[in-house]
Image: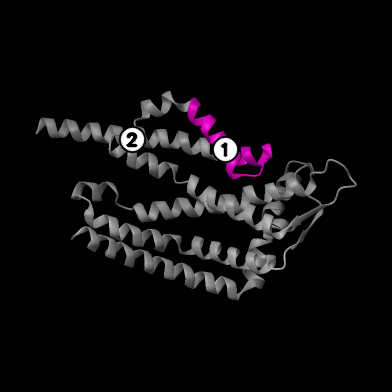
Amino acid sequence: MTFLEHLEELRWHLIRGVIVIIVFSVLAFAFPSIVFSKVILGPSEIDFITFQWFCDFSKWIGTSFLCPEEMPFILQSRKMTGQFTMHILSSVVVGFIVSFPYFFWEVWRFVKPGLHSKEKGVARGATFFVSLLFIIGTSFGYFVVAPVSVYFFANYQIDPSIQNEFDITSYVSILTMIVLACGLIFQLPMVAYFFSRVGVLTPALMKKYRRHAIVVILIISAVITPSDPITQLAVAIPVIFLYELSIIISWRVARRLEKEHQKFMSS
């Protein structure tokens, strides 16, 4: 295939992926009572499942410290197009998250024919694991990081006379940023696996720059989350764990490559 033929092939893969995103986005837009009221506004409600888990755990250990009592804030739309814009944005985000496995599969279908047989073996199951990590990451962002962030800012007051009245655009933007960022950050083990297979990354290198990586993780957590230390730690700690897991993955890959090399040399 020529370069233009490759571009044409890529264009159709992307078009099919975008069509699926649009279909799910339209479905999400058509059911605002479910998508917006239950999903988007869920972390802002005191009866959200995460807060119920915290409360049950708090009662189990014999205290009420982790049991939230109220969400002292209200959401407002200060722009004429505010609610309509946020309705569209939230629908597109939901459509993208739901259709991400198919979208990645379309991109993978374009990339896969250009790989050698050995490279195809290395990347076997890529769609499944990338999609799985994305779902785990977005779920972590939605059920853990987002409600903790909302609760922190809802109860944060420098003076009792100042009431918290958040704009709906700010709420939805922060929620979507947290969820999508967590979904992408959780791809770290897959990135480590592929770079280790091609020899760019080694476990010794990851161990050597562990402290630097932790600093970078903290910086990224501060950028993608609201500026409160609780939320930053809620994101940073799992990512640090994923970094340590990536070291193990890189070590296993290096060990397998060494065995393959020894087998090749002996033959």
Disc 1 secondary structure class: helix
Q: Is residue 180 left or right of residue 119?
A: right
Answer above or below: position of 138 versus 25: above
Q: Position of residue 178 (x, y in %)?
A: 59, 50
Q: In front here: 26 or 6?
A: 6
Answer above or below: position of 91 versus 187: below
Q: CA distance from mark 1 to mark 2?
A: 24 Å
Q: Is residue 30 magenta?
A: no
* Res 70 visible: no
Q: Which mark is residue 32?
A: none
Q: If the image is split into quadrants, where does the N terminus sit?
A: bottom left
* Res 157 visible: yes
Q: In front here: 171 or 250?
A: 171
Q: Residue furthest bottom?
A: 30
Residue that mark 1 sits on: 236
Span shown in magenta:
211-237
Q: If the image is split into quadrants, where does the C terminus sit?
A: top left
Q: Position of residue 173 (x, y in %)?
A: 63, 55
Disc 2 secondary structure class: helix
Q: Amino acid at mark 2?
A: Arg
Answer above or below: position of 39 versus 220: below
Q: Is residue 212 magenta?
A: yes
Q: Is residue 176 left or right of residue 22?
A: right
Residue that mark 2 sits on: 252
Q: Position of residue 27 (x, y in %)?
A: 54, 74
Answer above or below: position of 157 versus 100: above
Q: What residue do we see at 39% from left, 58% from top? A: 104
Q: What residue do we see at 64% from left, 61% from top? A: 40
Occupied quadrant, residue 224: top right
